C-alpha cells in the first residue's frame, strides 16, 4: 500500500490526498499505513510461528532489517522480543 497508488486510484495528487487525510483523520496517511502494518505484524507475531522475515514481507516491508527498526521505534522492543514477551496465542 503506497500513497502514490492510493492517490492514483482516487484520481488525486499525493499532496492533496495527504492533506485531506490529515484534515479528517488527524494523522498523516503514511503514519496511518505504518500503524496498520505494525498492528498486522503484532498479530502475526503472536498468532503464527512464521519467521520474522516472512512477517516483514507480509506486512509490506521488502527489508526485514528496516521492518525491525520501524517495529522497535514504535513498540520499543524488537519483533523477536515482542513475540517472546507475549508468548504464542491461539487465534481469536
Image (cartoon, rainbow, N blue to C red):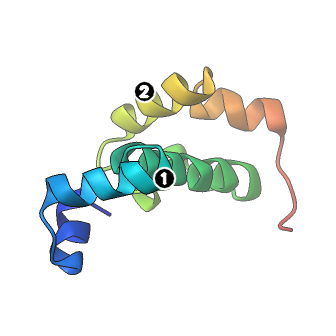
User: Which of marks 2 and 1 precedes in the sequence?
Assistant: 1
Q: Secondary structure at mark 1?
A: helix
Q: Residue at x 31, y 42 (%)?
A: 63
Q: Are marks 1 and 2 in contact (CB under 8 Å)?
A: no
Q: Quadrant of the N terminus?
A: bottom left
Residue matched to label 1: 25
Q: Residue furthest front?
A: 23
Q: Residue at x 35, y 33 (%)?
A: 66
Q: Secondary structure at mark 2?
A: helix
Residue matched to label 2: 69
Badge 2 crowding class, 10 Å Cα cut-off, few under 14, some 14 to 19, many 20 or more, is: some
Tell me: residue 18, above or below residue 63: below
Tell me: residue 79, above or below residue 24: above
The CA distance from mark 1 to mark 2 is 26 Å
Tell me which corner region of the image, top left, top right, bottom left or bottom right, holds residue 79.
top right
Q: Quadrant of the C terminus?
A: bottom right
Q: Residue at x 55, y 49 (%)?
A: 51
Closest to the observer, 83 or 42: 42
Give percent across and percent down for residue 2: 26, 60
Q: Residue at x 15, y 77 (%)?
A: 11
Q: How many marks?
A: 2
Amino acid at each position: 500500500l503506497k500513497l502514490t497508488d492510493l492517490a492514483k486510484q482516487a484520481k488525486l495528487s499525493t499532496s492533496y490526498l495527504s492533506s485531506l487525510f490529515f484534515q479528517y483523520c488527524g494523522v498523516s496517511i503514511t503514519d496511518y499505513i505504518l500503524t496498520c502494518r505494525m498492528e498486522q505484524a503484532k498479530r502475526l507475531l503472536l498468532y503464527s510461528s512464521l519467521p520474522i522475515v516472512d512477517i516483514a514481507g507480509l506486512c509490506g516491508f521488502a527489508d526485514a532489517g528496516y521492518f525491525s527498526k520501524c517495529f522497535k521505534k514504535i513498540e520499543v522492543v524488537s519483533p523477536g522480543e515482542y513475540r517472546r514477551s507475549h508468548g504464542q496465542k491461539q487465534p481469536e
